[in-house]
Image (spheres, coloured by chain):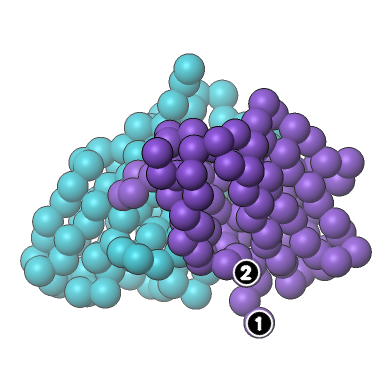
Chain colours: A purple, B cyan
């Protein structure tokens, strides 16, 4: 089983749509969780940290379910500029190395 | 906003040659990392560095790889004898403290011929 698993997509949505991405992780000792976005051939950029209580940053909402080892990202009112690959990232208890999912590709169309 | 910088942006090297990839982490960060991403694949951890020593490394980081922080600002990744399969984007990242987000440089594209 992959350590961090994501649906690769692509998700093709119209502008203004709401879209949700899911991610599962296999290591129950994982301690920190993040969503990064990566544009084509660019570096990963931090989108938001994910907290147990859930957290929101503008149009973006992240949720964590430790019991199910499941993380989600909701994007409301999608913009063309949201088109990117969204990376689910986990830090396990053994150290600070980031373990990346394969990413979910989002394409927002006019 | 402070950022991680990497040089060169693109390196083309003959197989068997040595390469050194350079990174300048964010100045008040204490943890440093190298990751790589083969085209079309996921980002993979190579090595972490803290307090002037390697704290963790992956299976990819074999005897051909080494890291250094020679002068308190630069953080380098050396590949001694490059192979075709070393072709990838190499990202440097730094982090202020445990559990904090890691910030990535914009990468060095390494092409081995």
Residue at 76 percent across and 69 percent down: it is A27
Q: Nearer the viewer, residue A65 or A90?
A: A65
- Looking at the rendering, in which quadrant would you find the N terminus of chain A? bottom right
Residue A103: x and y, percent? 52, 59
Where is residue B61 drawn, in percent x and y?
Answer: 44, 68
Q: Position of residue B63 (x, y in %)?
A: 38, 72
What subunit carries mark 2? A
Q: Does any portion of residue B104 appear in the rendered image?
A: no
Is there a contact, CB below 8 Å, between mark 2 and mark 1?
yes
Q: How crowded is mark 1: few (under 14 residues within 10 Å), some or many (20 or more)?
A: few
Q: What element carries label 1?
A: loop
Q: Residue furthest bottom?
A: A1
Q: How far apart are marks 2 and 1 (CA)?
A: 9 Å
Q: For mark 2, what is the residue? A: A5
Residue carrying label 1: A1
Relative height, residue A30 to residue A39 (above, below): below
Against B53, residue B59 (above or below) is: below
- Tell me if A35 is positioned left or right of B99 in this view: left
The chain identifier of the residue carrying mark 1 reads A
Q: Is residue A4 something one can see in this rendering?
A: yes
Residue at screen point 26% across, 74% down: B85
| Label total for image | 2
A94 relative to B53, above or below = below
Which quadrant of the rendered structure holds the C terminus of chain A?
Answer: top left
């Amino acid at each position: 089983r992959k350590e961090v698993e994501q649906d690769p997509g692509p998700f093709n949505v119209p502008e203004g749509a709401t879209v949700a991405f899911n991610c599962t992780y296999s290591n129950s000792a994982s301690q920190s969780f993040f969503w990064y976005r990566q544009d084509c051939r660019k570096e990963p950029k931090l989108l938001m940290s994910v907290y147990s209580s859930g957290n929101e940053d503008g149009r973006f909402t992240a949720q964590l379910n430790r019991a199910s080892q499941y993380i989600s990202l909701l994007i409301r009112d999608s913009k063309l500029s949201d088109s990117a690959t969204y990376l689910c990232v986990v830090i396990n208890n053994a150290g600070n190395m980031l373990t990346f999912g394969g990413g979910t590709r989002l394409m927002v169309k006019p | 906003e402070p950022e991680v910088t990497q040089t060169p942006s693109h390196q083309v090297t003959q197989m068997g040659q040595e390469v050194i990839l350079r990174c300048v982490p964010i100045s008040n960060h204490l943890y440093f990392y190298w990751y790589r991403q083969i085209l079309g694949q996921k980002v993979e951890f190579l090595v972490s560095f803290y307090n002037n020593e390697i704290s963790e490394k992956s299976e990819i980081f074999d005897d051909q790889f080494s890291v250094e922080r020679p002068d308190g600002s630069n953080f380098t990744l050396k590949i001694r004898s490059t192979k075709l399969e070393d072709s990838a984007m190499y990202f440097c990242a730094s982090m202020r403290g445990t559990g904090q987000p890691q910030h990535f440089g914009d990468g060095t594209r390494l092409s081995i011929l």
